[in-house]
């Protein structure tokens, strides 16, 4: 009799544990659903519906601001139609097909692209001819696929927030290439996944490496030549990485059309294979919750470490100071001279300098073309020369060090 009671008690406890495990499995699926691309469970603080609402609100604010200051929104013409046509081919092979995907063209002269998430992608008109060849649909696909990949990888932060939106409409967006709103690791993920989408949609995946090779030729791969390099992989690294990714997916491309096996390849490919969940089984609740916690914590560590790295770079940059700035001239040229002091513990090999030309009350123009190779050891000062631009009504100038290349 005692043996039967013990057996019953043991069986009851086992049932309770199984119920708890099943509840843990269902709870973890609610809080950490399978990632749409990788299939791994990862904590997602906002629902898809909430993400879409926030993105639409963000786009509405951008559109209203653009229209208020006379920036064309989706100007009619062949360029808008090209953007839409290329975009539609890409989203047709992308993960998260249920999103209300849409793309918009803003008539700004800067070269940039951005997504607030939720299926919305924005492209600035200056991207054509500066960042990509004006009539190259494959290079256009590289830009659009990169932003689409940010959305499908769930990169937009829960706030969708001010850094990206503010940068898009401010002078900070005037970098010749993507304005960073994500970590370098996320940018690399978006590069690779975008290249997969390009191949599946029939575009040449090698076009992505052409974009970054051009950036390397024009701007080099020193952080002193382009501010976004502090937040993105270096141009030469990015060129090599995207070329290798293109090589791995080249066999998926059916030139000019969607691969008929795109769904199958989307789940099983050389870049982002999808791990399909098998459903509940005894012990799966604990295992899934642990896997979700580990995946989420790993991503958190990467973001935290990069935030610290950026803060360290900013703190070091603040110790590089312009002690004196003055104008000089030769027989036929005018120069601006800066005495730059290195208050850091590392030698400086390159400087990027912005010159702000001012009237009595406002900044009239900013010249960001001054870069200089230098050799400034810790604690030393070196004189740097920049061309002086002819700016009507300018009465003074303010020099600002915007980036440093360290030795």
Image (spheres, helix red, strand yellow):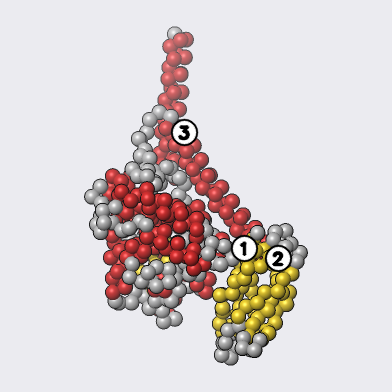
Q: Quadrant of residue 285?
A: top left
Q: What residue is shown with label 2?
A: 376
Instruction: Give the mark nearer the N terminus: 1 vs 2.
Output: 2
Side of 120 where 257 appears, left or right = left
Q: From mark 1 to mark 2, how far is it between C-alphas?
A: 11 Å
Instruction: Give the mark nearer the N terminus: 3 vs 2.
Output: 3
Residue at 52% of width from left, 74% of height from top?
A: 171
Side of 199 where 238 appears, left or right = right
For label 2, count other residues whose C-alpha is less than 10 Å away and answer few (under 14), some (14-19) or many (20+).
many
Residue at 28% of width from left, 44% of height from top?
A: 264
Q: From mark 3 to mark 2, how far is it between C-alphas?
A: 56 Å
- Secondary element at image label 2: strand
The dot on residue 245 is none
Taking 250 as reference, is 279 above or below it? above
- Secondary element at image label 1: strand
Residue 268: x and y, percent? Answer: 33, 43
Residue at 29% of width from left, 61% of height from top?
A: 88
Q: Give whichever of 174, 98 is nearer the camera.
A: 174
Residue 327: x and y, percent? Answer: 68, 84
Taking 118 as reference, is 249 above or below it? above
Instruction: Give the mark nearer the N terminus: 1 vs 3.
Output: 3
- Secondary element at image label 3: helix
Query: Is residue 187 at all visible to an observer of this figure?
Result: no
For label 1, count other residues whose C-alpha is less than 10 Å away and answer few (under 14), some (14-19) or many (20+).
some
For label 3, count other residues whose C-alpha is less than 10 Å away and answer few (under 14), some (14-19) or many (20+).
some
Query: Is residue 160 at all visible to an observer of this figure?
Result: yes
Q: Quadrant of residue 71?
A: bottom left
Residue 56: x and y, percent? Answer: 39, 65
Q: What residue is shown with label 1?
A: 405
């Amino acid at each position: 009799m005692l043996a039967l009671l013990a057996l019953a008690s043991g069986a009851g406890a086992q049932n309770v544990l199984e119920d708890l495990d099943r509840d843990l499995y269902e709870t973890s699926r609610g809080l950490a659903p399978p990632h749409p691309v990788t299939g791994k469970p990862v904590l997602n603080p906002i629902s898809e519906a909430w993400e879409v609402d926030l993105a639409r609100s963000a786009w509405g604010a951008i559109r209203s601001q653009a229209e208020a200051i006379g920036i064309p929104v989706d100007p009619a013409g062949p360029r808008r139609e090209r953007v839409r046509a290329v975009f539609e081919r890409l989203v047709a092979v992308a993960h998260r097909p249920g999103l209300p995907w849409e793309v918009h063209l803003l008539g700004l002269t800067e070269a940039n692209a951005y997504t607030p998430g939720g299926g919305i992608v924005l492209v600035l008109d200056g991207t054509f001819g500066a960042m990509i060849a004006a009539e190259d649909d494959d290079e256009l696909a590289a830009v659009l696929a990169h932003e689409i990949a940010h959305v499908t990888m769930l990169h937009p932060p829960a706030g969708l927030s001010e850094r990206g939106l503010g940068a898009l409409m401010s002078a900070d967006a005037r970098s010749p290439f993507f304005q960073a709103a994500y970590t370098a690791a996320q940018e690399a993920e978006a590069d690779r996944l975008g290249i997969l989408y390009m191949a599946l949609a029939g575009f040449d995946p090698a076009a992505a490496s052409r974009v970054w090779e051009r950036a390397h030729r024009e701007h080099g791969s020193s952080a002193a030549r382009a501010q976004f390099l502090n937040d993105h992989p270096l141009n030469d690294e990015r060129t090599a990485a995207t070329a290798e990714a293109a090589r791995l997916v080249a066999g998926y491309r059916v030139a000019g059309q969607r691969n008929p096996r795109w769904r199958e390849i989307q789940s099983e490919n050389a870049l982002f294979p999808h791990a399909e969940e098998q459903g509940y089984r005894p012990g799966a609740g604990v295992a899934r919750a642990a896997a979700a916690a580990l995946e989420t914590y790993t991503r958190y560590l990467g973001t935290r470490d990069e935030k610290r790295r950026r803060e360290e770079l900013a703190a070091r940059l603040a110790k590089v100071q312009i002690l004196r700035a003055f104008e000089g001239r030769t027989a036929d040229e005018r120069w601006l001279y800066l005495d730059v002091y290195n208050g850091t513990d590392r030698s400086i090999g390159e400087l990027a300098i912005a010159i702000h030309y001012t009237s009595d009350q406002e900044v009239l123009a900013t010249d960001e073309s001054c870069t200089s190779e230098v050799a400034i050891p810790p604690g030393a000062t070196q004189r740097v020369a920049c061309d002086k631009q002819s700016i009507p009504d300018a009465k003074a100038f303010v020099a600002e060090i915007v980036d440093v290349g360290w030795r």
